[in-house]
Amino acid sequence: MEPTGRRPVSAVPQQEYLLQGSIMDNSCEVLLHRLRGLCDNSELTPENFNDYEMAYQIRGPTGTPLVLRARQALDYPGNPWHLRYIGQPEVGDKNRPTLVRSSIDVSTSKNLVQFLTELGFRLESEFVLKGQVFRKGRMKIIVAKVYQLLQQGNPKNLEPISQSHLVELSVVAPSGQDALADEVKSFAEQLKPLVQLEKIDHRRLQHI
Amino acid sequence: MALSVNVSVEAAQEYQVQEITYDGQEIYTQPLSMSENLTKLAHKIDFGKVDDDDSQDHLESTPNFCGEEQKELVTFQPSLWPWDSVRTKLRSALTEISVLVDVLNIAKEKRYMVLDPVSQDPPEVKNVAILVAKKKGLVSAAAIIQKGAERLRISQAEGKNRSLSDFHLELLNMRQKWRLRKQGSLILGDLSYRSVGSRFWQNGTYEVTKSEQPNTTVTSLSPGGPQVPRPSALKVTLPSELEGNSYIHVVIQKDTETIAAGDFTSPFISPIHSDSHWMNKLEGAQNVLFCKELFSQLAREAVQLQPSIPNLVVGNQITASLFPGVQLCFSLCHLTAQDKSKATILPAPLENKAVLEHSLYQLLREHHHQNIHLPTPHPVTGTLGVSKRRQIAGPEALDRHTLMESCKTNTWLEQIIEQTQHTILRLRTMYIIDTYASENKDPLIVAHWASLSSPTCSSVKINIMTHGYETIYRTPLVIHVERKTLKAVCRDGRVMNLSYEPQELTYLLMSQVSQHQVNAVQCLAKVMGWKVLSSSSHVGVGPVEPIGNASSVVMASSTGDRVIAIRCGPQTDIQVSVSSSPQEQDFYPSTLVRDRKWQNLSGSFREVALEKMEGKNFLNKMENLMACLTTC
């Protein structure tokens, strides 16, 4: 038993500062080259990743669906799964450099899917991301290709969604660190004109 | 109005406490009397601030004011002094203004008075003084112009014979090797290790400027002459605490005399002169920063660690206890050009352990490397900068204990103490084996140190053998030298754990040697055709050995008529005794033994004087003995 009277440490609300963009496959090599030069540990070969993400959805009593994203590293089968809740993105006005959304992360065991289904979640969508990940300080930059699954639940049977790569520049930090957003923005400036990283509101995309 | 209540405002009855004495008595300040209060308030008025307009107003109202004042003065005689100064000032001002007005009025009339410019006598012109002043000014102006011209000439000469390297080229060169940035009109550099993962508080900012030194070496650069290094066009200005050079001096102290003197300086490093090349200066400064970071971390750990014998941190020295009577001592040596003369006088202190110093540097470099080479999380959405163990801690439901265990890492100080302890133990073991081997030539002791070792573990293989009889018998022994203990693996697979006390190893070697002798004799007996009747490595009879046990062997010749008994103890010498049957050639019958046949029983053992025997070593002597006792 833990000594009583110890208050549980409440998690600091984390916020993700995010910029997104995309680049055509044929110029992706140039971007990777530049990123390798700009980011930390340029002496090492950039790290590849191969993630399989499933979005699960549940409808609460209020009617607004709650989406949780379960991720698994296909190239590291021993690693724990990763469950993620992403809040509504705040685009803000023009002066705000990045998109900000709240984020709750947790590493989970491998029977996550079973647990979610038993809770009443159901699979909404799934995709596979293959690409490379870079680091620059606390920033994480991924350049990855999005694949759709030809057969549900089988991440081996894949088909690329488009002729381009997804580029994502993100920092997860406790809320209120707006200086980080400027850092993200200035890094994004360095990647121009290869890739235009912008605040992209997904809700608006859905309406189109 | 009928309901109006009189409100009286008055000061509180409590007096201000001036002081409280130790016995609790309060001493109050005496309250100001009304007049004193007025004086106090009057002092607060700043009369100097009054504007011109205001003063005019004052002038008009002065008579009244003064009248009132005087009335007041009558009633409040003690308060005369503060207002008095005001009054006198105002009065004198009024007088002066009145006079001025009168004069102006009279001058305006132009009947009685005319204002004319006064013709002054021209002041006496001192020509010499003017000449000197002008000369001085011209000289200083000329100096400035000449300086500028000189600088221009230098910069033009640079372009022609390139003796002084180009500022911009050299700056470019510097930029390729060092971090530089431009801030305003300054060129600032950073020599800290932040970019490679250091989190030390001190920053290593330096300034780069163009060198102002005159190009004196141009003339000395003759074609055949010795190559004079070109003066650099860059000048770096370092923060004063980073100037010079430094290193960490690691010493293992045996005595307690010089423990933690706290003011250690070493003459081993050459200080960097103020006129040396910027590259050397920067490298030196970076080294200083590195050593400071290392030392501060070590000092912090030394204070935090709680060993049985506390660590000492005094001045620029850290002392940690390794073994009883042996300390490890780190000193941060920082040498600037000013200290050079001081350092050369000092006698050379104990020898620096370069290997340990290197290990320390390695620890800091590893730490830096770890800081920026955190594992990338997979899946990539995971949190950055979390170690793999912590990532699985949640999903694997690790308990508190396991988690604490996994987080536990040795501090640098512990690591370096472990390494030093091992070094000392290794040197000590080496010394013991070598001393023992040189003291005891029979049998020979050969030590092979394994070339593969780790900073905290090494091993030695010892072979005990007799010269000339190497193939007959040898006793191998392996000793693993660890941090605080030795582990000896004997021939028969027994493992013995020894402490760091040197005596224990000596005893082990002594007992191994005595057993070797007995075992070797047994092997020799086989070759010689003798039979081993009995052997024991731990004899229970005979005189008690001070340490360990004696071993013995009894052998009979092939015909069985001669028996040799050997006893060999770790500290006592080897005893060899011989008995034979028939006992003696001559037989004289006595009352007890009447028949000659009893002569055939083996007789009593007689000791052989080994030192008088011929032979190079014990086994050789035994071979000779066996050979001559063998009857055909």
Image: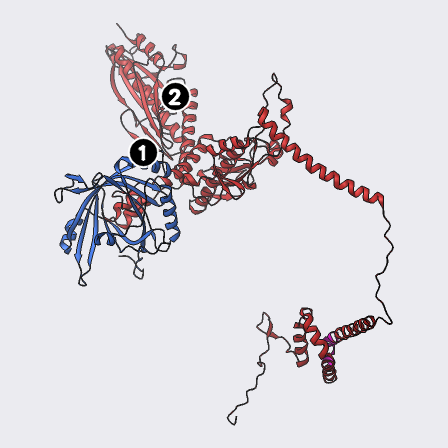
Chain colours: A blue, B red
Instruction: Give, as a single range, the part of the protein colored magenta.
Output: B77-86
- Please, what secondary structure does the residue beneath circle 1 have? loop
Q: Kindly check if marks 1 and 2 are in contact, taking CB atoms under 8 A apart as contact.
A: no
Q: Nearer the viewer, residue B144 or B549?
A: B144
**Which image quadrant is residue B412 in?**
top left
Whole-percent x, y for residue A1 in the image: 26, 57
**How many other residues sit within 10 Å of disc 1, few (<14), some (14-19) or many (≥20)?**
few
Whole-percent x, y for residue B598 in the image: 25, 13
Q: Residue at x 57, y 80 (%)?
A: B12
Residue where numbered disc 2 is placed: B573
- Residue extending farthest top: B632
In this rendering, is residue A101 above or below B268? below
Quadrant location, the C terminus of chain B: top left
Label 1 is found on which chain of the structure?
A: A
In this rendering, is residue B391 above or below A203? above
Label 2 is found on which chain of the structure?
A: B
- Please, what secondary structure does the residue beneath circle 2 have? loop
Q: Residue at x 39, y 39 (%)?
A: B367
Whole-percent x, y for residue B58 in the image: 70, 76
Q: Is residue B304 magenta?
A: no
Residue where numbered disc 1 is placed: A45
Q: Is residue B65 visible?
A: yes
Q: Nearer the viewer, residue B438 or A102?
A: A102
Q: Is residue B350 visible?
A: no
